[in-house]
Image (cartoon, rainbow, N blue to C red):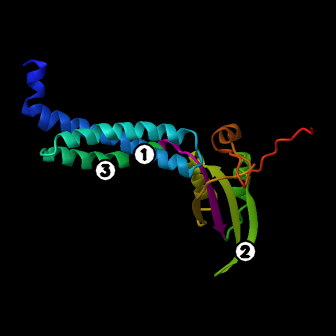
């Protein structure tokens, strides 16, 4: 079978085109998911580039849908590609481990072992005394790179197994102590209201 005959065949319309639409949707939705995450993290230079490729791929996919309006398999492929692309995008973002997190640790136990463990690993910490429902507690705050969350949780489980902890996203942070500070500054340190411009102006 030559190429023109194959394109005119049912295999092309009912198998090849839906598969291509499915794959295109996986790619463009994955890119879109990562783009939104980059915007939320303040990585403003990469997000527009991702948006460019995202919309080009989307146009290719929707163009095939328009050309095959009577092909219901293409609709299923489009929807399945969107769902799969969302999941794949979250997996990729999780692998990249972008951004900063604040970890709050509340414990009734003596936190010295945990504090020393975090200091050894060069995490910055702040500890305050507080009162809980059942008495005095210690609250420990630390801002970490997301890639280090599993390490922090492991230390909490080992040193203070009964401690309560919560984790939240941080969009911007100024200064601070991080195990890999150069990487943090390269990716996430932006000039914002929280990080004022320190450039000195020369007098005229």
Q: Nearer the viewer, mark 3 or mark 2?
A: 3
Q: What residue is shown at x 73% (from left), y 47% (from top)?
A: 177
- Secondary structure of residue under mark 1: helix
- Classify mark 2: residues with Cα within 10 Å, few (<14), some (14-19) or many (20+): few
**Magenta includes 100?**
yes
The single residue placed furthest to the top in the displayed view is: 2
Pick whichever of labels 3 and 2 is earlier in the sequence: 3
Pick whichever of labels 1 and 3 is earlier in the sequence: 1
State the residue position of label 1: 32
Query: Looking at this view, is 115 or 21 the one in front?
Result: 21
Tell me the CA gap for discs 1 and 3.
Answer: 12 Å
Instruction: From the viewer's perspective, tell me whether residue 89 is left or right of residue 12.
Output: right
Give above or below for 128 relative to 146. below
State the residue position of label 2: 130
Query: Looking at this view, is 197 or 177 the one in front?
Result: 197
State the residue position of label 3: 83
x and y, in percent, of residue 14 in the image: 12, 38
Tell me the CA gap for discs 3 and 2.
Answer: 45 Å
Quadrant into which the C terminus falls: top right
Q: Which residues are magenta?
A: 94-107
């Amino acid at each position: 079978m030559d190429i023109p005959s194959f394109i005119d065949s049912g295999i092309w319309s009912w198998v090849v085109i839906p598969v291509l639409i499915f794959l295109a949707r996986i790619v463009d939705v994955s890119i879109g998911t990562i783009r939104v995450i980059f915007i939320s993290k303040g990585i403003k230079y990469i997000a527009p580039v991702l948006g460019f490729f995202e919309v080009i791929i989307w146009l290719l996919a929707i163009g095939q849908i328009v050309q095959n309006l009577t092909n219901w398999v293409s609709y299923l492929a489009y929807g399945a590609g969107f769902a799969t692309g969302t999941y794949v995008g979250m997996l990729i973002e999780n692998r990249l481990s972008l951004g900063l997190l604040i970890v709050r640790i509340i414990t009734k136990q003596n936190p010295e072992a945990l504090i020393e463990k975090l200091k050894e690993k060069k995490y910055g910490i702040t500890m305050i005394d507080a009162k809980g429902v059942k008495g005095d507690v210690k609250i420990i705050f630390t801002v970490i790179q997301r890639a280090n969350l599993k390490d922090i949780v492991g230390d909490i489980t080992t040193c203070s197994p009964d401690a309560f902890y919560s984790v939240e996203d941080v969009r911007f942070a100024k200064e601070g102590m991080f195990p890999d500070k150069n990487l943090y500054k390269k990716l996430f340190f932006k000039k914002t209201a929280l990080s004022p411009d320190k450039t000195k102006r020369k007098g005229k």
